[in-house]
Image (tube, rainbow, N blue to C red):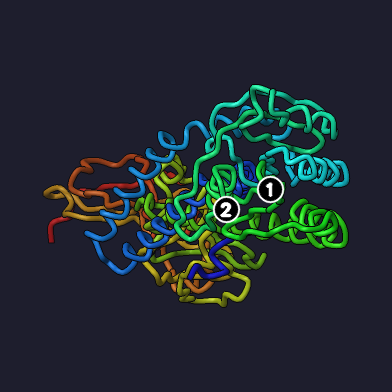
Amino acid sequence: MIPIEPLTTMIRWQDIIDILLNAYILFRLYVLFRGTQVMRVVAGLAFLWLFQLVASQMGLVVTSWVMQGIAAVAALIIIIVFRNEIRNVLQAQNMRAILWGFPRKNTLTPVDILTESVSELSRGRIGALIIIPGKEDIKDKVQGGVEWHGLISKEMLLSIFWNGNPVHDGAVVIEGRRITRVGTILPLSLRQDLPERFGTRHRAALGLTQNSDAMVIVVSEETGNIILAKGNEIIDIHDGQVLRHNLRRHLGIGQDSVKGVKRESLELAAAGLVCLLCIIAVWFSFTKAMDTLRVIEVPVEFTNRKADLDIFGTSASNIRLYLIGAGPLIKHIQSDQVKVSIDLSQAEIGTNTFNLSAKNISLPPGIRLNRMEPVVLTVSVDKLSSKRIPIQVDWVGSPPAGMRLESAVLSPSTIRMVGASRQLEAIDTIYTEPVDIGKLSSSGTFHTKLLLEPASAQIADGEADRIEVTYIMRERTPL
């Protein structure tokens, strides 16, 4: 499970937009294809992907590889096998419906007109086959027929199934208030347990309802009997009220309509949440798989230093960081985007030891710290003070033969130094750079530089860093 704390450093605002956008696209695909065979196969693919993820986490290399191959092939099969169903769904929707709309079951079918028409067909023993689709698309389950799109009326249905009409042997498809197709041919059921009185129309009705959520009304031409077929269920209709009740229940009209709307809203909300969780899981899976290690060195920044204190030495000026993140992100990270800071608000005079951790590191979103070197840093802190210190020439070597150094006058003879108070207290003399006395052949003047020790001590502003030395050389007096 991903820990809560690191999420703020792992996720960028771009990642949030990326996750929400893809979750919405997945949700829209669900809305468009729910109830179709495509959705069932996609659910199977999702299960394969989850199984492959679990296998990968358990270290089952072969199983994970096989599941990846099956999922890749299955995705291609969906496009090929269900291309017609996919095309029909997309063609039936306008751009607004694809991007935003929520298609719901059409509840505008006039039940009373349909009930009266079926009763009239039964009394006249006019054979009929009427299809009322559910949520699923049945276009790939029926064949032939003629596009109609006429408004439902008793006269229209009686004329369609009149024995002299060329399309009377086929089925009609009713969607909403319109008859959208006439003369449609249905697949025949292969069930062996059907009564002998059932003819071709009855088998055609069951052939469709067994493979979809549609309801089919059958009127027998020989007996005038009415049956309803839905799923594997066959209902004999002997009363118009029973027919009306079943039609209203199938269409979601009446007392159950409000419950149906609430149920559908809850279903869509649950589907949206599942889509979001799926995309989050995919995001974590991809970013983890794309993790790259990079090493950079970053200078240490010291914060909240007391005004009367200064830093006079550290055990390391740079920290080496081993960073992990997605390849495209970590590849372009700059050193100025990473900061290593140490809070000196509690520092005391002397040597302070700090144990570095992730709290001292500031990283861009999406980048994580693997480790750092060093993990312990010492910082020397002291008060800044000044002191005037005598200067002494650092003579080396021996005077020329027969000569001796009688005197040397330095200008200036003292210098004011600035540095840590404890260090300055230990300094009694400042020496110049080494001067070889053997190279001085006669009296004269030369200039030399001061040798600053320790290096943290500095010459105060306004003081010269070069010393003028006036010396006198004399011949040695024989004893």
Q: Position of residue 345 (x, y in %)?
A: 63, 71
Residue shown at the point (65%, 45%) measured from the top left: 31
Q: How many marks?
A: 2
Q: Nearer the viewer, residue 243 or 48?
A: 243
| Residue 44 numbered mark, or none | none
Q: Is residue 256 left or right of residue 75?
A: right
* Disc 2: which residue: 197
Task: Give the secondary structure at mark 2.
Answer: loop
Q: Amino acid at mark 1?
A: Thr
Residue type at numbered disc 2? Arg
- Residue 2 sits above or below residue 412 on the image: below
Residue 375 occupies quadrant: bottom left
Q: What percent of the width, then of the height, locates residue 191?
A: 46, 55
In the displayed structure, does residue 82 sit left or right of residue 444?
right
Above/below status of 357 relative to 15: below
Residue 298 visible in rendering? no
Q: CA distance from mark 1 to mark 2?
A: 10 Å
Residue 79: x, y in percent?
A: 44, 35
In terms of depth relative to the viewer, which is nearer, 265 or 214?
214
Residue under circle 1?
223
